[in-house]
């Protein structure tokens, strides 16, 4: 078929593919444990449901303003002031279908064909694909294996005359690493000086453990909201466990938001008013649920680290946030896709190959399920890999015997 070469070169999201596979295996009765997920298990906040219900009950569900309802943009403005210490106008904010669409529209707005976007590895799978989709060139920069944090010198040494933006995500998917404040500050100051865009994908910024807080990229610039090169992306998806509501946003200088708005109005027209009402309900409602979720995730992280410590030779950097970690399994299998397939086939544990995140030899493991699932999933992995583990275990009510 004579199709677009660029479109045909874009890979399917491996995480979404694995989610679909896990669901279909579960539906067929397989005792699947999903350590590949990218969404917290909690229910959406009651304030979000009530707001969506009230909106639906008006029966008046029509097109909405393309950049998002004024009231949600104001709520995002309040969130930005409360969490980033910066007062922004509604014209500095656009609402889109999740952080994903927001990022895509932003890259489309910033990048000319051949422009480079620096993406520190390990990175979220979709970044390089999105950069390529808008005609840009993703430039990945390796991080220290002991920290999963890039060194400022190496990151900045990757800058060329074609660099349009640096895209950071901290706390980080897939590693759970949080970049130190000094690094974020140095990169922000560099970008402001050179006129390079710093895109901070802050979607996990509240899911931080051990009583810490994520460094605030907007806190390190003395430029105002129109002259800054710092752009923040966020969403209700992870913080409130509202992945299915598809509401995210960007905070950026007005001309950027205006172009993103034009792109949105020419493609999707607008977001659903019902879902925007829900997001507003979450932002304005009680925040206790976020704290509870963080404490549940921190507990799960500890369970995960304890279980991984039982597998000889597996090293993991302690995550400081998110609900992921990125242990190194290269002692057992260097090819992470082969290992992922092996674990799914032998012990019904879903994992995501590190290769997809620029971290071959590692697996991304999620701990957003229950602590029991985390413990059992890792115990099954140990059983499958470690010859010193007992020869038999119970999986899904049956005795499994290791014969490999
Ligand atoms: C780093 C990062 N950015 C963006 C997204 C997408 O967020 P949303 O569901 O709001 O589109 C994800 C989801 O996994 C993510 O991990």
Image (spheres, grey):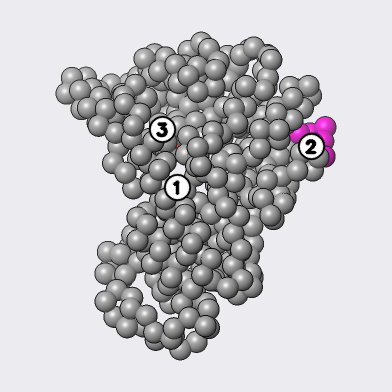
Q: Secondary structure at mark 2?
A: helix
Q: Say which of marks 1 and 2 sits in front.
A: 1
Residue under the image location 40 percent in, 64 percent down: 375
Work out how far the residue at label 3 is from the one at label 1, CA to CA, in angstroms.
19 Å
Mark 3 C-beta closer than 8 Å to ligand 1? yes
Q: Which residues are magenta?
A: 156-163
Work out how far the residue at label 1 is from the one at label 2, CA to CA, in angstroms.
32 Å
Which residue is denoted by mark 3 in the rendering? 236
Q: Of residues 57 and 403, which is closer to you in this image? A: 403
Q: Of residues 198 and 170, which is closer to you in this image? A: 170
Q: Position of residue 153 (x, y in %)?
A: 81, 40
Predominant secondary structure in magenta? loop
Q: Of residues 397 and 353, which is closer to you in this image? A: 397
**Quick check: is 363 in the magenta stretch?**
no
Callout 2 crowding tier (Cα within 10 Å): few <14, some 14–19, many ≥20: some
Outermost residue, bottom side: 403
**Which of the 4 quarters of the picture holds residue 258?**
top right
Q: Position of residue 94 (x, y in %)?
A: 48, 21
Q: Secondary structure at mark 3?
A: loop
Going from the N terminus, do you reach mark 1 or mark 2 first?
A: 2
Q: How many discs mark residues in the rendered view?
A: 3
The reply, left or right, for residue 247 in relation to residue 308 is left
Which residue is denoted by mark 1 in the rendering? 298
Q: Is residue 363 above or below residue 83?
A: below
Which residue is denoted by mark 2 in the rendering? 156
Q: Position of residue 176 (x, y in %)?
A: 55, 47
Residue under the image location 49 percent in, 31 percent down: 234
């Amino acid at each position: 078929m004579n199709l677009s070469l660029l479109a045909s070169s874009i890979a399917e999201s491996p995480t979404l593919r694995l989610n679909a596979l896990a669901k279909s295996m579960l539906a067929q009765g397989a005792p699947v444990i999903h350590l590949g997920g990218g969404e917290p298990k909690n229910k959406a906040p009651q304030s979000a449901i009530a707001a969506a219900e009230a909106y639906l009950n008006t029966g008046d569900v029509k097109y909405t303003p393309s950049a998002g309802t004024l009231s949600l943009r104001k709520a995002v403005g309040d969130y930005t002031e409360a969490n980033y210490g910066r007062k922004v106008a509604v014209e500095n904010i656009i609402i889109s279908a999740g952080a994903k669409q927001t990022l895509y529209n932003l890259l489309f707005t910033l990048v000319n064909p051949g422009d480079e976007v620096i993406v520190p590895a390990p990175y979220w799978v979709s970044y390089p694909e999105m950069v390529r989709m808008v005609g840009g060139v993703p430039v990945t920069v390796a991080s220290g294996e002991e920290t999963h944090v890039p060194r400022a010198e190496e990151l900045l040494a990757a800058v060329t005359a074609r660099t349009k933006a640096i895209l950071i995500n901290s706390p980080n998917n897939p590693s759970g690493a949080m970049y130190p404040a000094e690094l974020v500050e140095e990169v922000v100051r560099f970008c402001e000086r050179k006129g390079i865009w710093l895109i901070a994908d802050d979607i996990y910024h509240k899911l931080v453990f051990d009583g810490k807080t994520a460094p605030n990229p907007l806190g390190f610039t003395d430029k105002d909201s129109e002259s800054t090169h710092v752009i923040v992306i966020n969403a209700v998806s992870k913080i409130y466990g509202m992945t299915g509501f598809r509401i995210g946003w960007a905070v950026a200088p007005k001309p950027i938001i205006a172009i993103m708005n034009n792109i949105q109005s020419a493609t999707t027209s607008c977001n659903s008013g019902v879902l925007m009402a829900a997001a507003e309900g979450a932002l304005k409602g009680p925040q206790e649920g976020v704290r509870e979720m963080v404490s549940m995730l921190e507990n799960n992280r500890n369970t995960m680290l304890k279980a991984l410590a039982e597998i000889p030779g597996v090293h993991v950097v302690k995550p400081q946030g998110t609900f992921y970690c990125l242990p190194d399994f290269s002692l057992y299998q260097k090819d992470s896709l082969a290992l992922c397939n092996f674990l799914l086939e032998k012990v019904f544990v879903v994992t995501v190959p590190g290769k997809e995140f620029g971290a071959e030899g590692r697996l991304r493991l999620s701990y957003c399920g229950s602590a029991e699932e985390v413990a059992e999933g890792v115990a099954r992995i140990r059983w499958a890999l470690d010859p010193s583990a007992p020869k038999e275990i119970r999986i899904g009510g049956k005795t499994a015997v290791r014969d490999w």
